[in-house]
Amino acid sequence: MLKGVPNIVSPELLKVLMEMGHGDEIVIADGNFPAASIAQRLVRLDGHAIPRILESILKLFPLDTYVAKPVSLMAVTPGDTVQPVIWEEYRKILVTSREPFTDFDYVERFAFYERARKAYAVVATGESALYANIILKKGVVVEQPL
C-alpha cells in the first residue's frame, strides 16, 4: 500500500496509468463489455463498480486539456429505451474532481469498440449498469511548486 493511492487502484492499474502518455486513452468497461477480446492491455477489477474506480483514477490521472471532450461514453443504441442514470453519477464525479470537463462525447457503439481496440488499456469491471462504458483521454501533469 502507498499513501495517497486509493486502495481500489491495483498495482497493475497503477503501472498502466504511469505508462500512459498524453493523448493515450483508457476504457473503464462495464461487465457486459467484450473487454478480453478487445483490449491490447487488460486490467481486471472484477467485482468493483465503475463510479468508485473513476473517482479513484481521477485522483491520479489528468484529463487532456487540448481536446474539447476528453471523456467519452458509449451512446445509447437508436431504438433502445434505456436511460443510463449512471451518467449523472459520472458527471458529478468529474465535476468534483476539478479536472477540465464540460460535457461527454457520445460515441456510437461500434465506433466505441474501435476506439477501445486502439486504447492503451481496458479496465474490466463488475459494473452492472447498462451503457456504463467510459473512455478517458490522458492529459499532462503540470508540476505544482512545493
Image (cartoon, rainbow, N blue to C red):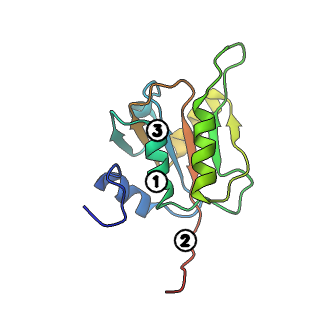
State yes or no: discs 1 and 2 in contact (Cβ < 8 Å). no
Label of residue 27 in the image: none
Q: Which circle's residue, 3 or 1, is located before the other in the chain?
A: 3
Tell me the SS state at disc 3. Answer: helix
In space, the residues marked 1 and 2 are separated at their CA atoms by 14 Å
Q: Which element is circle 1 on?
A: helix
Q: What residue did someone put label 3 on?
A: 50
**Mark 1 surroundings within 10 Å by alpha-carbon count, few (fewer than 14), some (14 through 19), many (20 or more):** many
Local SS, label 2: loop
Above or below, 14 against 84 in this view is: below
Relative image position of residue 104 (x, y in whole percent): 69, 43
Residue placed under numbered mark 2 in the picture: 141
User: Disc 2 versus disc 3: distance between alpha carbons?
Assistant: 23 Å
Q: Position of residue 20 (x, y in %)?
A: 47, 60
Kindly identify the residue that appears in the image at 38 percent across and 31 percent down: 126
Is residue 6 rendered to the left or right of residue 58? Answer: left
- Nearer to us of marks 1 and 2 is 1
Circle 1 residue: 57
On screen, residue 61 above or below 112: below
Asked if residue 101 lies left or right of residue 14, the reply is right
Whole-number angstrom distance, CA of label 3 to CA of label 1: 10 Å
